[in-house]
Amino acid sequence: MTYKGIAYTVIPNRNPGHLQWQFQIGDEIKSGKTETRLELLAMRRAELRINRELSKFRTGNWPAQRIFWHDGIR
């Protein structure tokens, strides 16, 4: 899936009722778990985290590095 140009994945965890999400911005890989059976809720949590990480980049709190989107370098 893609949100704001960032590719992310949501997959089932080995624990029932838990889903894992993961995305990468530059060299940083962010991942997390959501306790839910609803994939849409886990997708929303991943998108909220993407927003948080992108806001760090926009405000200058992100380490100096290139940001790679799924379709190339911007």
Image: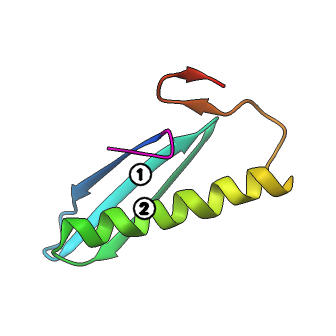
State left or right for residue 74 relative to residue 58: left
- Secondary structure beneath dot 1 equals strand
What residue is shown with label 2? 46
State left or right for residue 33 relative to residue 24: left
Q: Which colour scheme is used?
A: rainbow
Magenta segment, prevailing SS (helix, strand or loop): loop
State left or right for residue 25 relative to residue 6: right
Kind of residue indicated by mark 1: Gln
Q: Position of residue 42 (x, y in %)?
A: 31, 68
Mark 2 Cα shell of 10 Å, populated few (<14), some (14-19), many (≥20) = many
Upstream in sequence: badge 2 or badge 1: 1
Q: What range is drawn magenta here?
A: 1-5
Label 2, label 1: how far apart the Cα atoms are: 7 Å
Residue 36 is one of the magenta-drawn residues: no
Q: Where is residue 55 in the image (x, y as percent from the top left)?
A: 71, 59
- Secondary structure beneath dot 2 equals helix
Kind of residue indicated by mark 2: Ala
Numbered label attached to residue 22: 1
Q: Which of 10 and 48 is in front in this view?
A: 48
Q: Which residue is drawn at 54% across and 57% down?
A: 50
Classify the position of the C terminus by image quarter. Answer: top right
